[in-house]
Amino acid sequence: GNAALTPFGTTIFATMSALAAEHDAINLGQGFPDTDGPPEVLEAAVAAIRGGANQYPPGPGVPELLEAIAAHQARFRGVSVDPRTEVLVTVGATEAIAATVLALVAPGDEVVTFEPYYDSYAATIALAGGVRRTSVLRFPDFAVDETSLRAAFSSRTRLVLLNTPHNPTGKVFTRAELELVCELAREHDVWVVTDEVYEHLVFDGAKHVSVASLPGMAERTLTISSAGKTFSTTGWKVGWVSGPAAAVAAVRAVKQFLTYVGSGPFQPAVAVGLGLPESVFTGLARSLQGKRDRLVDGLRGAGLEVSVPAGGYFVVADAASLGAVDGLAFCHELPVRSGVVGVPVSVFHDDPQAGRTLVRFAFCKRDEVLDEACRRLSS
Ligand code: PMP
Ligand code: GLN
């Protein structure tokens, strides 16, 4: 096989979901909701299938979705993109990340990112022959460390890959933190690739700041998002990337040979979703905030120290407060001992000590599922 991928093996999500099934445990590992999203979106997919949208869609995406993505960028982010040349629909954000990294990174180029990172970042950087240079976000506040971030940049840096709201920590990057990233990107004349799949899932009045909306950044930023989290349709795999036309064309060239096109009947349905009233987006965030509080209270009740997330699907807890010394071992025992599955944060780190005792739990689940998980963890 491709030697670059040898260290990666099976993803942690597959491993932990298999453990959940084997022990009939509550799966708070992989992040996916257990309820459906807006009925208008679901009905639009059914209508698209019935209407015959079942063959290859156009390469860049169906026109109504390209236009809906551009309108969504303008409406929520104040960013203007041309739907014909500056937007590309992908098979989930996962393909957008892979195609973007493969398009921009040549062997030996360096990519600056933060750890813990979403697992596909490390794998796609490796596939491109790139070199990962990271800055560690540390429990419990996961603040950006300016010194290590500056040190991660060099003359070989090609791009910065960041994620806000952040998986696995639930951190929402502050404007000041993003401005520091942007200042460094400009200083080193590199791209910023920003994964904003949790853009609508922010809590407590926190504000999601989109990198492309910051002064002077649209020309060097590629923004990635996905319908999976916004409409609770993670299985539909509709994602997108937007940014300057030349860069989007380069990403499209790669995408053609990864999947060619994808998600035919789901694309018009997501276009419907992106045009729904604001209350649909804020309603989801409000509902998730309640679930976050439920899980945070339950984990604290079980004796765990937690970092309260400002966004996303996940809460990170420190199993050291229960005497654990290794989060990976803890997560393998937890389904057997307590009937609950979480994900060890250490697998999202390069630094073997960082995040060593941390565990990520998903709260995008029905209240009764969260309550039962908390009951099991307490006993
Ligand atoms: N980026 C991040 C940070 C994610 O958490 C996820 C979903 N787990 C993805 C990308 C992938 O999104 P999609 O399912 O649309 O491919
Ligand atoms: N984004 C989800 C998570 O982090 C699912 C990832 C996956 O299954 N690849 O849990």
Image: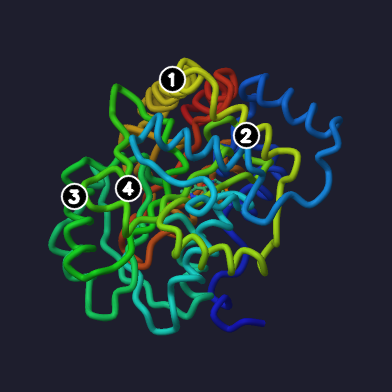
Residue 351, by quadrant, is: bottom left
Give the amino acid type for the residue marked by disc 2 in the picture. Answer: Val
In three-dimensional space, the C-alpha distance between marks 4 and 1, rounded to whole angstroms, equals: 22 Å
**Residue 66 shown left or right of residue 57 in the figure:** left
User: What residue sits right under mark 2 in the picture?
Assistant: 270
Task: Choose mark 4 or mark 1, whichever is in front.
Answer: 4
**Residue 38 shown left or right of residue 50 in the figure:** left
In three-dimensional space, the C-alpha distance between marks 2 and 4, rounded to whole angstroms, equals: 22 Å
Tell me where residue 375 appears, x and y as whole percent.
52, 23
In three-dimensional space, the C-alpha distance between marks 4 and 3, rounded to whole angstroms, equals: 11 Å
User: What residue sits right under mark 1 in the picture?
Assistant: 282
In three-dimensional space, the C-alpha distance between marks 2 and 3, rounded to whole angstroms, equals: 31 Å
Q: Earlier in the sequence, mark 2 or mark 4?
A: 4
| Residue 134 in sight | yes
User: What residue sits right under mark 4 in the picture?
Assistant: 212
Q: Earlier in the sequence, mark 4 or mark 1?
A: 4
Tell me where residue 210 appears, x and y as whole percent.
33, 42
Task: Choose mark 2 or mark 1, whichever is in front.
Answer: 2
Give the amino acid type for the residue marked by disc 3 in the picture. Answer: Glu
Give the amino acid type for the residue marked by disc 4 in the picture. Answer: Ala
- Residue at 28%, 28% in the rendered image: 206
Disc number placed over residue 268 in the picture, else none: none
In three-dimensional space, the C-alpha distance between marks 3 and 1, rounded to whole angstroms, equals: 26 Å
Task: Choose mark 4 or mark 3, whichever is in front.
Answer: 4
Residue 151, by quadrant, is: bottom left
- Residue at 38%, 58% in the rendered image: 193
User: Which structural element holds mark 1?
Assistant: helix
Give the amino acid type for the residue marked by disc 1 in the picture. Answer: Thr
User: What residue sits right under mark 3 in the picture?
Assistant: 179
